Image: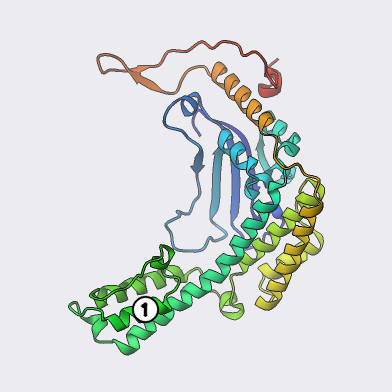
Amino acid sequence: MTNRKLLFKCQSGSHLYGLNTPESDIDYVSVFLPSTYDVLSLQKCEYINNSTKSSTEDRRNTKDDIDDVAYSLPRYLTLALGANPNLIEILFAPKNVVEVEDPIFTYIKENYSKFLSARVFDSFMGFAISQRKKLEYKKTRFTQLQNAIEFLEENKPDLIKSSSALMSEETANYLNSILSHYKGKKSQCESFHVGLPFKMIYEKLVYEYERYGYRVRTDHFKRLGYDTKFASHTIRLLHEGRQLLETGSLQFPITGKAFDDIMSVKTAQVSIEDFYKLCTEYEDACRKASEKSLLPKSPDWKWENDFLVDTLFFSIKTEKEYPSRGINSNGESIKLERVEFLEPNQFTLTRQQLFGDN
């Protein structure tokens, strides 16, 4: 975050929702003011990931992991305009989960209504449905990989050990038919065909199976047949969407029936049949809220755009020096000189409101 002012940082995820358990990891969302270099150069910085676990690690988060993501102010406003659930939520973060809050972001929170619109329905409902599809897809893909490996081990034990054995048309067609969620299907092409090395294909399937297995090899998944984490996100998002559409705000921590329902799903107390009934109940409630909602059709884009322009202008003007360097005619690295800016015709905020100057 060098040369970048931190405007806001809060705990997000289960700690924001009041749904955390002793096994919950800690999530943070931050918003920073980009430096002059970030704004004016070709090297934009819109997103910084300081999470402890790499996205390439094939394991679930543990209670010791920290997800820490920071967004530049322009990026944050852009995503919030689109009613991104994770970024709309922090506008309503209570004080007990907030670690840093600059007056600039306080002003944004005070004007939260500028971000809300009927788009909330599509965004929150869309994210909820995607979470539900993920939990269904994960089990299907895992089971298909398992079945394909067992088929090869039982029916082609010698061929999968041979470096010279090639796949027949019959085997290729069979694998294509039972692996409907394999990678090739996403691009509408067959993943397996005549002439592929048996051993290579078998080893690749085993690799995919073992790499994917950590996502579904849990006691809850084996017993219930679905991922309780994704399922709880589904109900939470539908609840939040309904609340925004009905009241124009969010209340954290989540309480009442919604809390009970979400925690029951999260702690694996709900069968998959009852989970789908719960989904239908919350989806119907969200749709009805959308039909009666008084939220405007679109957010206040002009207010947000003017606010961003004024904020960035003041930031650039008052930054003591550029954190960047240039190259002179001799090829030598030199510090860039300060540029003088003309005063704008109008500001939506005063300097004192933005930076607390006297």
Locate residue 321, reporting x and y percent.
48, 17
Looking at the image, residue 179 lies above or below residue 187:
below
Instruction: Give the quadrant of residue 80.
Output: top right
**In the image shown, does 98 or 93 lie closer to the viewer?**
93
Locate residue 298, reporting x and y percent.
70, 40
Q: Which residue is at a point 37% across and 78% down the rendered structure image?
A: 175
**In the image shown, does 20 or 346 lie closer to the viewer?**
346
Which residue corresponds to mark 1? 175
Locate residue 126, reporting x and y percent.
63, 56
Which residue occupies the extreme bottom position in the image?
155
Looking at the image, residue 295 lies above or below residue 6:
below
Kindly state the secondary structure of the residue where label 1 is placed: helix
On-image quarter of the C terminus: top right
Locate residue 68, reporting x and y percent.
55, 47
Amino acid type, mark 1? Leu
Q: Which residue is at a point 62% across and 24% down the rendered structure image?
A: 311
Q: Which residue is at a point 56% across and 16% down the rendered structure image?
A: 317
Looking at the image, residue 79 lies above or below residue 346:
below
Instruction: Give the quadrant of residue 134.
Output: bottom right
Looking at the image, residue 169 lies above or below residue 290:
below
